[in-house]
Image (tube, rainbow, N blue to C red):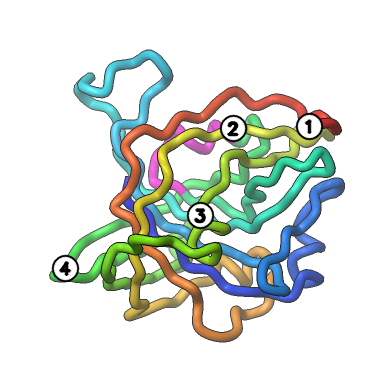
């Protein structure tokens, strides 16, 4: 699974209105952070299905997310949008995940990786080209904080749910943004991003495991 992380800092009050209670918006370096993260999922399958089984789907996905903490102390992701090029994935709306179908493509040209996306209306939702840099041998807090989250929160049936995610740490590299246009932040209700984004690229992790969604407990 290859992935690019593009992050912008926002005033906390701009993000607070988009996150349900009782989740708290996490701050880092004095602000809330919103991540635009296009990636490719390969050989997606239910637990117990062998990876070598022919016909396992590979597809592109783009999410817009922010970083939150539950009163029980557990941190995680809150998704503002999820666009996916797989007709089966929107079924995950049953657990409250805001999936919607989109036409997404990921291509490589020379040293650059290009992501393009269109929603159901045909309107462009994102266009991003990045040039990966050197591997980050000693990640700093700014590298690790937005890329190391092990649960996602969703809201369904009036309850807050959490879904655990397991995988090895992302092997990160720096990245240079060569082109970036997106409508996802505006559609989510955010002001236009200000300043240059913090950008990382990863060649991916091999074993991503999603657990069963359960209602959140108020105690650790």
Q: Which residue lies furthest to the left in this view?
A: 110
Residue 109's disc is 4
Report which residue position mark 3 lands on.
147
Q: Along the line of sight, which residue is nearer the eye, 169 or 163?
A: 169
Check disc 1 and report the residue beneath it. Answer: 220
Q: Where is residue 84 in the image (x, y as percent from the top left)?
A: 44, 47
Query: What residue range appears in magenta?
Result: 84-92
Q: Does the magenta stretch include residue 85?
A: yes
Determine whether the residue tagged by mark 4 lies in a helix, strand or loop: strand
Q: Is residue 104 visible?
A: no
Q: Which of marks 4 and 2 is nearer the N terminus?
A: 4
Question: Between tags 2 and 1, which lies in front?
Answer: 1
From the image, state whether disc 1 or disc 3 is nearer to you: 1
**Which numbered disc, 2 or 1, marks the residue that appears first in the sequence?**
2
- Residue at label 2? 164
Which of discs 4 and 1 lies nearer the camera? The answer is: 1
Q: Are marks 2 and 1 in contact (CB under 8 Å)?
A: no
Q: In this view, does 164 lie to the left or right of 28?
A: left
**Looking at this rendering, what residue extends furthest in the bottom direction?**
195
């Amino acid at each position: 699974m290859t992935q690019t992380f593009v992050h912008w800092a926002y005033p906390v009050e701009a993000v607070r209105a988009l996150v349900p209670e009782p989740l708290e918006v996490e701050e880092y370096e004095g602000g809330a952070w919103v991540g635009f993260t296009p990636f490719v999922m390969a050989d997606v399958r239910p637990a117990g299905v062998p990876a070598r089984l022919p016909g396992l789907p590979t597809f592109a996905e783009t999410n817009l997310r922010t970083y939150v903490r539950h009163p029980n102390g557990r941190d995680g992701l809150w998704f503002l949008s999820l666009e996916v090029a797989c007709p089966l994935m929107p079924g995950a709306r049953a657990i409250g995940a805001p999936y919607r179908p989109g036409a997404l493509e990921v291509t490589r040209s020379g040293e650059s990786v290009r992501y393009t996306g269109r929603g159901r209306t045909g309107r462009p939702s994102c266009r991003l080209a990045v040039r990966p840099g050197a591997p980050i041998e000693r990640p700093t807090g700014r590298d690790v904080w937005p890329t190391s989250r092990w649960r996602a929160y969703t809201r369904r049936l009036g309850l807050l749910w959490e879904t655990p995610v397991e995988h090895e740490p992302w092997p990160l590299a720096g990245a240079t943004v060569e082109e970036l246009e997106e409508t996802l932040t505006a559609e989510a209700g955010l002001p236009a991003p200000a300043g240059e984004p913090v950008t990382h690229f990863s060649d991916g992790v091999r074993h991503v495991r999603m657990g069963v969604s359960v209602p959140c407990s108020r105690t650790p």
